[in-house]
Amino acid sequence: MNNDTIVFIGLDTHKSFIQVAVLQGHRGAKPDHLGRIKSNKSALIKLAQQLQSKYPKATLHFIYEAGPCGYWTYRLLTSLGHCCYVIAPSLIPKKTGDRVKTDKRDAAKLAKLFKAEELTPIYVPEAEDEAIRDLSRARETAMKDLKDAKFQLKGFLLRNNIQATVNDNWSKKHLRWLTDLILPHHSQQIVLQEMIITISERIQRLQRLDNELLHQVKNWRYYPVVKAVQAMRGVRLLVALGTIAELGDLRRFDHPRKLMAYLGLVPTESSSGGKTRRGSLTKCGNSRARRLLIEGAHTYRHKANISVELQHRQEGLPKEIVDIAWHAQQRLCRRYQRLLQKGKHRNIVVAAIAREMIAYIWAIAREVVVSEVDPKARIARLPA
């Protein structure tokens, strides 16, 4: 399609309003500010209808920054048949010395930069995928809160020179021992009881989220991918689910090296002339998915082996996926030991293993068929 048949609409989104700027596609065009509209469903639909009637032969391209307001704007506009792109704020170029920032300038800047192909759109998950990701993150937050509560109680006992007589920490026997403790001061006894109650509540909260996660993931469209990825060593349900929930559709990467760079698992480089300098990892992209892969990479320090648990996880999977997982285990276990023998630091070795792990996960994900979502059926999740 010719460039003069495209109209770029920059949206500076906020909680209660949206600033709109329109830029036509022909050469020398200047942004036209349309003012503010309410940040709701009906106002956006009305804006799209007015622009379509004003430019009947043009294709509307909406652009806005990712932020705390979520992706409902993207889902609403794409369900109406328009093109919409979400831009990461960190990827927007900024001139040195540009100290004036207003909503009008931000909206016009988005339209101009996108027209000049200076912006790269980010991947937007479907509503169902984002819901599973929220549940997975909530489970991780619950685990962190539980650990924090346990650390606080341990610190409280250490300050009061109280040593546990039970070896199995946080078992039912240990919790009963904590309940039977009697401290010399009533105020400290109240603190102890509140800490015990907090830990018990957070244990129940974690159990509820675990049960809900096991139930919801089986109805998820990416569950075949989650199940197939578990054929690999060091990738159990929580690691597989968290990785796929954070990354979404891995098929959008045409090569695994792009996925490695997306996760920040590639080293930084500053080369010029005949000098090549490589440093630490870039650590860009999704930090949670990178951390989950690092956790799974530690299991490759042992020799290659198919355990009973791994056999159960591989039951019912196609032979191609099992072969990929076994080839990955053989290669990564050898590579782990070889890098250690070269004198590499253990953290560097683990990062190298995690970098290759995601390549094998990418290969397994391409062997699984995932159902597509109709853009017209997307849910905006916002009242009219």
Image (tube, rainbow, N blue to C red):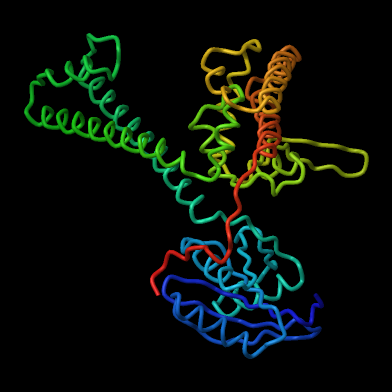
Residue 188 position in % (x across, y down): 13, 28
Residue 323 position in % (x across, y down): 70, 22
Give whichever of 125, 276 is nearer the camera. Answer: 125
Give whichever of 316, 241 is nearer the camera. Answer: 316
Quadrant for the N terminus, please: bottom right
Q: Which of the 4 image quadrants contains residue 240?
A: top right
Q: Which of the 4 image quadrants contains residue 175?
A: top left
Give whichever of 246, 102 is nearer the camera. Answer: 246
Q: Residue at x 88, y 38 (%)?
A: 275
Q: Residue at x 35, y 30 (%)?
A: 147
Residue lying at the far right in this picture: please name it: 274
Placement of 228 over or under 246, stated as above or below:
above
Residue 190 position in % (x across, y down): 11, 31
Quadrant for the C terminus, please: bottom left
Residue 204 position in % (x across, y down): 26, 33
In the picture, measured across the screen, residue 366 lies left or right of residue 216, that is: right
Q: Residue at x 25, y 26 (%)?
A: 153
Q: Which of the 4 image quadrants contains residue 230?
A: top right
Q: Residue at x 57, y 75 (%)?
A: 11
Placement of 214 over or under 124, stated as above or below:
above
Give whichever of 77, 262 is nearer the camera. Answer: 77
- Tally of numbered discs: 0
Placement of 364 over or under 65, stated as above or below:
above
Placement of 321 over or under 158, stated as above or below:
below
